Image (cartoon, rainbow, N blue to C red):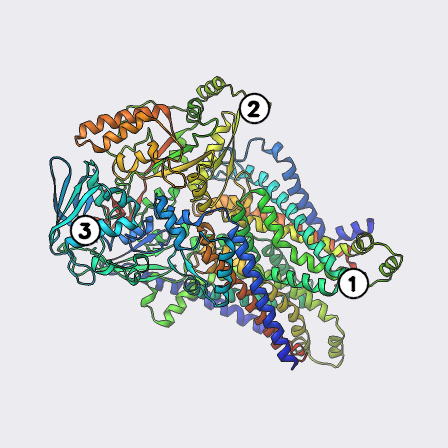
Amino acid sequence: MSQFLKTFLRRPAGAVGLTLLVLVAAMAIFAPLIYPASPWEMSGIPFSRPGENGMLMGADTLGRDIAAGVVHGARVSIVIGIASTLTALLIGVTLGCIAGYAGGMVDGAIVRFTEIFQTIPNFVLAILLVAILTPSIGTIILAIGLVSWPPLARLTRAQVRSVSTREFVQAARCQGQSTLSVVVRHVLPNAVSPIIVLGAMTVAAAILIEAALSFMGLGDPNFMSWGYMIGAGRTVIRQAWWMSVFPGLAILTTVIAINLVGEALNDALNPRISRA
Amino acid sequence: MTVVKSILGKVTGIAFAILVIASINFALVHSAPGDPALVIAGQSGATDAQFIEQIRRDYGLDQPWYVQYASYLKKVVTLDLGYSIRQRADVSALILERLGPTLLLTISAFLLSLIGGVFFGALAGLRQGSWKDLAISLVALILYATPVFWLGLMLVLVFSINLEWFPAFGYANIRAASFSTWHYALDVAHHLVLPALTLAAIYMAVYTRLMRASLIEVAHEDHVKTARAKGLTEGRILRGHMLRNAAGPVITFAGLQAGALIGGAVVVETVFSWPGLGRLTFDSVTARDYPVLLGLFLVMSILVIAINLLTDLIHRLVDPRIGAR
Amino acid sequence: MKRRDFNTLLLSGLAAGASGVPNLWHDGMAYAQTEGGGLTALLTPEPPMLVLPLNQQQPTIVAGSKIYEGLLNFDFDLNPIPQLAESWEISDDGLTYTFHLQQAARWHDGTPFTADDVVFSCQVMLMELHPRARGNFERCESITALDAHTVQFVLKEPFAPFLKAFEAGSAPISPKHIYEGTDYANNPANDHPIGTGPFMFKEWVRGSHIHLVANPDYYVDGQPGLTEIFFRIVPDAASRSVALESGEAQLSSWNDVEMFDVDRLASLPHLAKTSQGYEFFSPLLWYEPNLRREPFNDLRFRKAMMHLLDKSFIVERIMFNQAKAATGPLCSTTPFYEGDVPDYAKDAEAAAALLDDMGLAPDADGIRARISFLVVPAGEMWTRLAEYFRQAMAAGGIEVTLVSTDMAGWGQAVSNWDFDMTNNLLYQNADPALGVARSYISSNIRQGVLFTNTEGYENPEVDRLFAEAAVALDPAERQRLYSEVQKILVAELPVLWVAEQQYPTLYDNRLTDVIVTGTGVNGNFATARYA
């Protein structure tokens, strides 16, 4: 474990990423303490510039504090990012395991299905899903999860296939353990590290998809999110750049942090590949 | 014989994919809560129940779903995409007139990102650890994490609003009809710069990173070492051995990204008022224009399959070893 | 090493490209300027068609009203002025309306315009296609052509605002020789609409623009003053602002320009602004409760909500002063407006007292009631109105959950009465009998139909007053009846009126006589010209 941590932190990317991520996470967790008032509160003076009227990042068109929105928005982004990734993992890992372990016809069918799902323009599918199911935090998570699983399924399948051929798995099979038990106890644990890395990257991608959905007006109207803020500020960008610039920077920072952590994880978990 | 077989396999695969996509689309769109008859009525300012019933009958909306489904599949096979209630035009015509701008945008962005990605990736990968590598990697890292719509807005802020170099929106000048062909092409190209750059930037970042990693990997391969041992010049090693081999995986990956590229086009077209399929998709979702939506999804998916085939072709050209298989 | 050379080449190539770009742009600008008397107007969203009798969406009317005309138009005070009718008489019993038509008017295909076209349009075509026109012409006992240029409408019973039915968008006159006996919706002429108006259809590039050219045979000498009109379709609001700012477009209407941007654009030296020209429509915005549901069926709850709302906040911050606080069910620009009604000022204590009186005590979280709000999916203003409503109600202990939907879902929910609260905005169409009564009379509670009495308000007295006022001929008598009904409605709050929307029209200040009537940009633009 300490070896892992060392490798992880030795790369500056890992350290920087982790620091940023902790910062964003802290923002999300302590949002109600930093800005106790609702980010929807229209108490400020509209179009205040950053620093004016006691608002660090200025105010939006209704006098809402941008900084409060950025801080509270972290919660939505992170919750949606993680929850939709878990949804995607659930679908992708399950299908990938079945395909990789069962092989044959089942494998062929699942691979075909996955390929077709990858063919459909996934953001367009997400738009359609959210629009049909009406936008709410639940439907957004579901939609992002439903369009994000194919790469996870493919990776899981590949991993499971390579691990399944190894001796200890063969041994477990010969001992007469049930398929489920072999997969869960022997195959998955040895196949999991690249999946974790890809999972981290999926969180980043999910945050971007959520932002784009909110930007297009398909966000949950009860939660302040970064994409929503950019969408709302977009039309006034000429008069008030701060309304779209700060939430955009927040998304950027979060996604960079997750990607850096993912890469460092990759290096630490899969030292063979990272040699280069 | 094997070639014929592989082509045949590909064709049936594509046909099957289209069938599945068509079915998914149909199921999705028809589980929508909105009543299209009411939208049409509402939008024409109608307040008349009799009128709404009439619309329902006229457009077959009162039929059970399986009847609508069967007639939809039949139409797909005959390439009849139906008639748009809202726009009062044939869906195929609507899509066709928006297809050009989308193709122009996505293909420009695709090529730009691929060429840029391979170029910058090679630049960074060859001088691993140099300031060039650092700078390129850093920019790629940032671009990779940038929401595409936000990047578009920032480019508009800088290049349209502040510098006034490029138009902030649109496809061509309003009076473009009177332009000469050459002038018209220039005008469209001028409008294309920002949206194509926006869409390309994100993928360029991806390909840059891939190319860099790929090149570094290739540099350690035996045949490169052999070539070097044979005393070939660095330039020849680079062109003859490394670039081709390294670019292969990038191109394959780029093909797989086609779906994402089309998705990105939806957002970019919204930001830049680009009159393409993406813009049409969003308008149709909001308006619940069923026939257009169904047609769009089909066409976009076919587009993705086509781009996949195209990259396959490019890959064969770049890396002749594949063709021999 | 060739790579360095290649880099240098690439960079110089880029630099050359970049330096070439501004030139091209300026070149393009030269074309963007109007030469001759052409007008480029914005149009949002793209209309489905231009055939006015077949489609009455806003953008269809804006563009189609230059091609199609009505018998009458209306000045800023909503008095009738000639369009296809040169003059007209009304009999003393208010039953017979006789119109004398323009002698020189011709359809764009050269066929003379006659009384038969009017009879066909009002008696046949519009009856089938145009719900609002049907409502008006159903009142007719007969519609007859007395001679080639005289047409007579005889009503079954008097209907005071009948003249208002002849405005172009309400009753566009269509060519009989083209549409009679055909399938209107699929008539090939729909792709090339033919009207009598000052502009003729030239070309429509979908997704880009609609091109109209001046009608050289227009029946008014010296009109139109413009040589052509381009309606440029720009779906994005920010882009529309840029188009006005750069001079690429010279006119905006309705919602083209986001409200917050209006004042900035209006202050530019080359642009002028007017809020005149929407008197005929007079849109009124309100928050609509579903009176069939608890707690909205309780007048005290509705009063409490009204006391929690700050109309001036909505007018100033959400509508950026492109509006005026509403006082009741009529806009101040609609005839028979009554200003002497009770006022519900913002007063959190009064609201709390009303809620206490209802027995809605705050729970542990300080919440007295939980309601949902269906957000109107029609753009930013509506989203902000919903967000503001949630914050305003929160101050009184009413927790509001916003529900978002698409236009179809909204229409379905509202017309089938499946909502707690929502927003709504209706045009008053120049007379309370045409555009106001429909939202409050019990006979217009019609499930499945939008823009009816969707809140479910019922009051026999209100029904009676609206019915009497519609047929009364004496304006003073109508004023008395409408004043009474307005007082009752304001006391009972079937909906919470908040603002009269005042759409701005921004135009290039070299243009004159663009907005000359109460129908503004929905007029035919015959008089518009460059100074």
Looking at the image, can residue C526 be seen? Answer: no
In screen coordinates, is C204 left or right of A175?
left
The answer for which chain carries disc 1 is A
| Chain of residue at mark 3 | C
C-alpha gap between disc 3 and disc 1:
82 Å
How far is the residue under mark 2 from the one under mark 1? 59 Å
Amino acid type of the residue that numbered disc 2 sits on in the rendered structure: Gly
- Name the element at disc 1: helix
Q: Residue C388: which disc?
A: none
Disc 2 secondary structure class: loop
B124 sits left or right of B27 in the view: right
| Pair 3/2: label in front | 3
Q: Chain of mark 2?
A: C
Measured as percent of width and height from the top left, residue C220 is found at 14, 54
Up the image or down, C207 lies above or below A79; here it is below
Give the residue type at disc 3.
Val
Calculate the distance from the C-alpha at mark 3 to the C-alpha at mark 2: 64 Å
In the image: residue C439, left or right of residue A209: left
Work out whether disc 2 and disc 1 sit on a shared chain: no
- Helix, strand or loop at disc 3? helix
> Residue A132: x percent and y percent?
52, 48
* Residue at the image point whose x is 19% and y is 27% from the top: C477
Snapshot quadrant of residue C282: top left
The mark nearer the N terminus, 3 or 2, is 3
- Same-subunit check for callouts 3 and 2: yes
Badge 1: how crowded within 10 Å, few (<14), some, or many (20+)?
A: some
Identify the residue under disc 1.
Answer: A162
Amino acid carrying mark 1 in the image: Ser
User: Badge 3 is on which residue?
Assistant: C119
Q: Which residue is mark 2?
A: C366
The residue that appears at 69% across and 50% down in the rendered structure is: A90
Label 3 crowd (10 A; few <14 / some 14-19 / many >=20): many
